[in-house]
Amino acid sequence: MAARDSQFPKLDVREATKVYHTRSGDLLAIDRCSLAVEEGEIVSIVGPSGSGKTTLLWSMSGLHHLTSGEIALDGQRVDGPHPDISMVFQDANLLPWRTIVANIRFPFEIKGAKPDTAWIDQLMHRVGLEGFGQRMPRELSGGMQQRVALVRALSFKPSVLLMDEPFGALDAFTREEMNHLIEEIYLDTRTTIVLVTHSIDEAIFLSDRIVVMSARPGRIANIHRVPFERPRSLEIMGTKEVFDLTHTIKSEIVGDQISKARNRKNAANLSKAS
Amino acid sequence: MASSDAIPDFKQSPDGGGEVGVANMSGLAAGPGIKSAREVAIIALVAVLVIGGAELLLLAFGVPQYVLPRPSEIAWALVTDFHLIAPHLGHTLVELISGFTIGATVGLILAAVITQFPFAEKIITPYILLLVTTPMLALVPLLILRFGFGYEPRIIAVALASGPMVMINATTGFRRVDSAKIALARSYGASTLQIFWKIRAPMALPMIFVGLMVGSIFGLLTAVGAEMVGGGFGLGNRLTSYSSMIQMPQFFAVVLILSFLGILIYMIFFLLAKRYASWEA
Ligand SMILES: Nc1ncnc2c1ncn2[C@@H]1O[C@H](COP(=O)(O)OP(=O)(O)OP(=O)(O)O)[C@@H](O)[C@H]1O
Ligand SMILES: [Mg+2]
């Protein structure tokens, strides 16, 4: 375990605010979100659809320019894509005209670096994809494609891994498998991970902390600590502690939506009455 | 900066938006796939029946040669007169290949450049549509006045006919932006040029092949048409000359060569597309 040698958090989100300028007007997607992700931590972001999870994650990756606020990596301001930050996108996002190997080498090609073949082979072995290098993406199942995406994201040893609903399109079993895989790789590399997910189970199984966002505007509503030791077994998922935590987070997400809907209804009634 | 704010969650059809109707001929690229020996046998049998049937019918009804020659007469003319036709085939190929190369190159470059600038695209597209829909043959008499009866007017006409076809299809291809794939490249720090060569160009490739195929066929039509308008050489010139001399077997021999040329062009681009852009199928 790397000793913390810095007074800075690994990834520091300070008052991040993003306004989208659209044809139908401005939209405040995230509003003054602050979050300090520590080195070697796994943080999940959950929240209702449209609460700005993707926006927040893309801002962390440097793919978005914030309207105000800033993101810092090891205390250094992030302006644009950073070589130490890697992103796993929703549905694998492989390039269909390239073989699996060529897909995994893509980041190196862009960076003009020599691929670290030993490390890539090790990762391929770890995710059970040896011998699939020369296949085309369409020949692989969804789960396998997502594992390729994971290998691609880790191939250049980033110190931060950002994942946007990486397993959203997978069935429950494959998803569980992927969660174990992530934990295993994490225990090996201690990569700092930020994960957007719709699954509270997944968030609890993987994370040290869970960030709950509320919608319109997207704000950080609450942050929960998940106290279990790693490696975590599936048994913990049946404990009362997990049950309570799940319930709390669920009601925070659903409650937020219900109260917003109620407010809209009240407002509508008021305007009707006047 | 619309592109930098794009989000992969937006369910974008991989075909992209706003395809130009006339340009979308991807059906051509699908091509026929011949599967078994049995299919080949049936196809051959039908061909024999059609050709043999035509032969017999023409014989039975005593259709004179100057109206419609029998297949055997056409085949014989092809054998005996090929050495007379071959130089003209060469001329047509020169016009087609040089005109198409010029047109396709300019078309591809223009497509690549204007799709980087949406506003330029809006300005230029109507003119390209005009070029696509106007038969370039109409300009040939004018070109002949200016350039004489040599290769030049024909090469220009071929370039003008094939270039816009290539361009409009390539534009459709380059417009197929998949924001998630572009974001992927950007997340590794890709430059605009890298995004073009590593994402946009490969994504456009299937449509580029369709454009090259349609463009070259249009080029062939235009080359032959231009040869019929004026000048003493080329397969089109042979058509007018043989028909005016009522040498119908030779006339149809030339038609046969032209069909063969068309099919050859189709096959070349079909195979190229299969080799380099089959990932889409
Ligand atoms: N490129 C964009 N242009 C304009 N508005 C956008 C853009 N991207 C997102 N939005 C809007 O910003 C808000 C937050 O979107 P975002 O995608 O970050 O939410 P999310 O929490 O990831 O939602 P989901 O769970 O559905 O993925 C939404 O209201 C969305 O419509
Ligand atoms: Mg999202």
Image: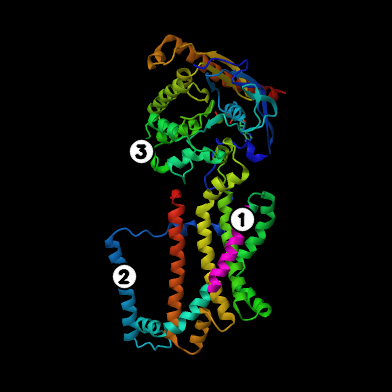
The residue that disc 1 covers is B111
Report the magenta residues as a range. Answer: B94-112
The residue that disc 3 covers is A131
Q: CA distance from mark 3 to mark 1?
A: 39 Å
> Which corner quadrant of the image does residue B135 belong to?
bottom right
Residues at marks 3 and 1 touching, judged by CB atoms closer than 8 Å: no
Q: Is residue A274 visible?
A: yes
The mark closer to the camera, 3 or 2, is 3
Q: CA distance from mark 1 to mark 2?
A: 43 Å
Q: Could you tell me residue A195's position as x and y percent?
A: 52, 25
Sequence order check: which comes first, mark 1 or mark 2? 2
Quadrant of the image where one finds ligand 1 = top right
The three-letter amino acid code for the residue at tag 1 is Ala
The three-letter amino acid code for the residue at tag 2 is Val
Residues at marks 3 and 2 touching, judged by CB atoms closer than 8 Å: no
Q: Secondary structure at mark 2?
A: helix
The residue that disc 2 covers is B46
Residue under disc 1 on the same chain as residue under disc 2: yes
Q: Judge whether B53 appears above or below A158 on screen.
A: below
Residue under disc 3 on the same chain as residue under disc 1: no
Q: Could you tell me residue B80's position as x and y percent?
A: 39, 85
Q: Nearer the viewer, residue A232 or A85?
A: A85
How packed mark 2 is, by other alpha carbons closer than 10 Å (few <14, some 14-19, many 20 or more), is: few
Residue at 52% from the left image edge and 33% from the top image edge: A89
Of all chains, the one bearing label 1 is B
> For disc 3, does the CB lie below 8 Å from ligand 2?
no
Q: Secondary structure at mark 1?
A: helix
> Which corner quadrant of the image does residue B270 belong to?
bottom left
Of all chains, the one bearing label 2 is B
The mark closer to the camera, 1 or 2, is 1
